[in-house]
Amino acid sequence: MSRTAVVKSVSDVTPNMRRIVFGGADIADFPQGKEGGYIKFVFPDEPRVKPDRPIMRTYSIRAHDSTAGEITVDFAMHADTGGIAIDWATNAQPGDEIPINGPGSIKMAPPDADWYLIAGDMTAQPAAMCNLEMLPDHATGYVVLEVTSEEDKQELSLPEGMELHWVINPSPHSAKEKLLEKIQRLPWRDGEPFVWTACEFDTMRALRTYYRTDRQVAKDMFYLSSYWRSGRTEDQHKVDKNKDAQATDSTVVSLAKSVMGGV
């Protein structure tokens, strides 16, 4: 569904995380329970990839205040690369309007896992925090969050059993291995975990192998997604994701046929 979002306020949560609160008549009836899900910002004045498809950029809903008729979106600023959405967020002022589509859904952590691993870089931090806020009080496990600087750490209220690890990476576009290496060094706990991870595309693929092959995490017990790819626009990244998904599906089918004797 297409809506017009009106900027209500702009603030910097940390040096590299800008928070924009949106309201307006179209947000008054925004669906509840979509925190952590995504919306797509539409930039109709930008050159189109295809004649019938305007440029869009995807962001997570950090919070929703249905009483005030407001949604909050946190923008990881990526000052070294810029981009359409970053440029817009940098210059946004109260009263500005922008079309949005959505909301979409996201897989949230279930309340009954033996333990949890919630991990992500700065682009994933808003959705990761929504997941953390929904964890049961008895939850145990790990939180691994990559940020650009020490000043980008945010205060978190976690269940006592959740162990927090910050990864400082001032160059996430080039030093893509830091989040991966930190996760791989964590002692793997007993029981069946729920794993939620969102990050850069190449890091995602490496972690997929680690979770599925090395740690044998059940398919229905993890959410793994890439929110961006270094050196690629969102439209290019979407093409990469589709190709990767098709290749992964083909591999699964081939393995299944092999197990069944080529049937």
Image: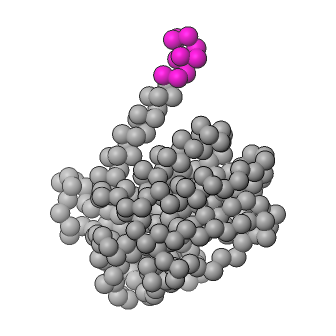
Q: Please give the name of the residue rendered at 65% of the width and 76% of the height, measured from the top-left corner.
A: 156
The tally of labels here is 0
In the drawing, does residue 227 fall left or right of residue 53? Answer: right
Image height of 113 relative to 85, above or below: above
Q: Is residue 230 magenta?
A: no
The one nearer the camera, 238 or 171, is 171
Farthest right residue? 138
> Which quarter of the rendered picture does the N terminus lie within?
bottom left
Q: Does residue 123 appear left or right of residue 42 in this picture?
A: right
- Judge whether 50 appears above or below 242 on screen: below
User: Residue at position x 21%, y 55% from top?
Assistant: 49
Nearer to us in this view, 135 or 55: 135
- Segment colored magenta: 254-263
Residue 161 seen in the figure: yes
Task: Locate residue 113, reporting x and y percent.
Answer: 75, 51
Q: Is residue 184 above or below residue 47?
A: above
Q: Residue at x 53, y 48 (%)?
A: 207
Query: In the rendered image, is residue 99 in sight?
Result: no
Q: Residue 61's x, y, as percent?
A: 51, 69
x, y percent for residue 14:
49, 83
Q: Residue at x 55, y 68 (%)?
A: 167
**Chief secondary structure of the magenta portion:** helix
**Percent x, y for residue 162?**
73, 65
Question: Which colour assignment does the render follow?
Answer: one colour
